[in-house]
Amino acid sequence: MADLSKNDVSKFLSRRSFLTHTSCFGAYYALAQLVPLPALGETLGASVNADSRVSQTPLVDKGFAVVRKIGNGLYATISDPSKGATTLCNGGFLVGKDAAMLLEGFTTTGGAAFQMEALRMVTQVPVKGALDTHYHFDHSMGNSYYGANGVPLWAHANVARRIVENYSPLQGADKAAMLAPFEKAVKDAKNDTEKAHAQSDLNAVTTVYSLSNATVLALPNHPVDPSKPTTVDLGGLTAIIEHLPGHSGTDMIVRVPEQNVVYTGDLLFNGWYPVCFDEKATISGWRATLAKFAAMDKETIFVPGHGQLCGQEGIATLREVFDDISAQAEKMFHAGVPVAEAQQRYVVPDKFKNFPVFAWGFTISPAIAKLYGEWQSK
Ligand SMILES: [Zn+2]
């Protein structure tokens, strides 16, 4: 297992010579080059597109994100990273008779402020809390806006620790020393494909370094117990916060069972390659979570962590992506291809060619390393 993750970004980042302990992120520099998010009607399954719960007219549209009503007291914030990184991830809010709940701290305080203003367009009820669905930078770096405005910050009990472990070491760190191994990987690449992979990783790490140094980190002060579901009563609207495995080890979903709406956080990337680099990401766990989503009501509306609003077809597509990565990796595994080579050799099939890949070292490459690990430990 020693060479399992030679090309794995989290391994690079955990070298104590230049960082104490880091395995952060997805990437956003790369996202600036993305094709714009498909329009609502282009991606929604026929049933959800025609769904009367989803308002065709946005509550607010700032380009970088659109807020839309998707149910009774339920709103989704859907980001389009090609139009700016103010929010980057998706979010939303839930509004009951007595209280409201916000989802996500986003990448910047501007993102959190934007969503709070959207909430105030529809209600003046007190905000019970803002939930980070997990600790990653694009969901948590705008947290200080909530702190400054007296909004309790909710998250999986391990989120505060993981924000500190992953992003504090980047603050004030020597940039040249930090980027050196990633620059070396670009220089040492054996061919154009490997060079493009390495360059995408360098871009991502550079971005997270910059963001970390431009951000006042704010930690959740209201830990949510991951061992059992938490019921939140907002007054005539009941939400359930629940931990599921897969993406980061700190993932919380928010379900509104009475309306068949699920805010998945990054356990769902709709029309994107999934970000799998996290040291606590588990491919088998993630696939089990997706199987759980697939077993939910066929009328369920999913608000993914990234990508357009969707119905069950979004779940089915991400399962296909995992199936494809797994099938290609398994062939190489059985043929004795070393993991480092397999990580480079995966080919994006035609049907997924428009799917954004954050950065190779945060998505496909670690997924293959983790799959190899799971097979080797059998
Ligand atoms: Zn994430």
Image (cartoon, grey):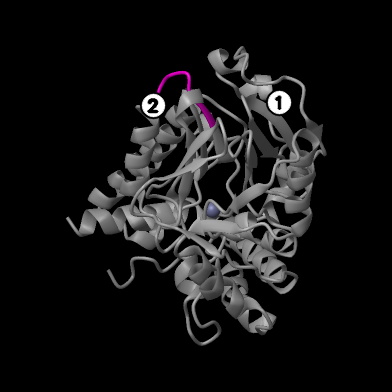
The residue where tag 1 is placed is 39
Task: Residue 19: name its quadrant.
Answer: bottom right
- Please report the residue visible at 66 percent of the width from the left and 70 percent of the height from the top: 217
Above or below: residue 42 compared with residue 175 = above
Q: Residues within 10 Å of mark 1 (few under 14, many from 20)?
A: few
In the depicted structure, whether residue 365 falls above or below residue 9: above
Residue 211 as seen in the image, left or right of residue 315: right
Horizontal relation, residue 158 to residue 85: left or right: left
Residue stretch in magenta: 296-302
Q: Nearer the viewer, mark 1 or mark 2?
A: 2
Q: 26 above or below 75?
A: below
Q: Is residue 298 magenta?
A: yes
Give the main secondary structure, helix, strand or loop, of the magenta stretch.
Answer: loop
Q: Is residue 214 above or below residue 309?
A: below
Q: Position of residue 368 (x, y in %)?
A: 38, 53
Residue 343, horizontal then vertical, whole percent: 42, 55
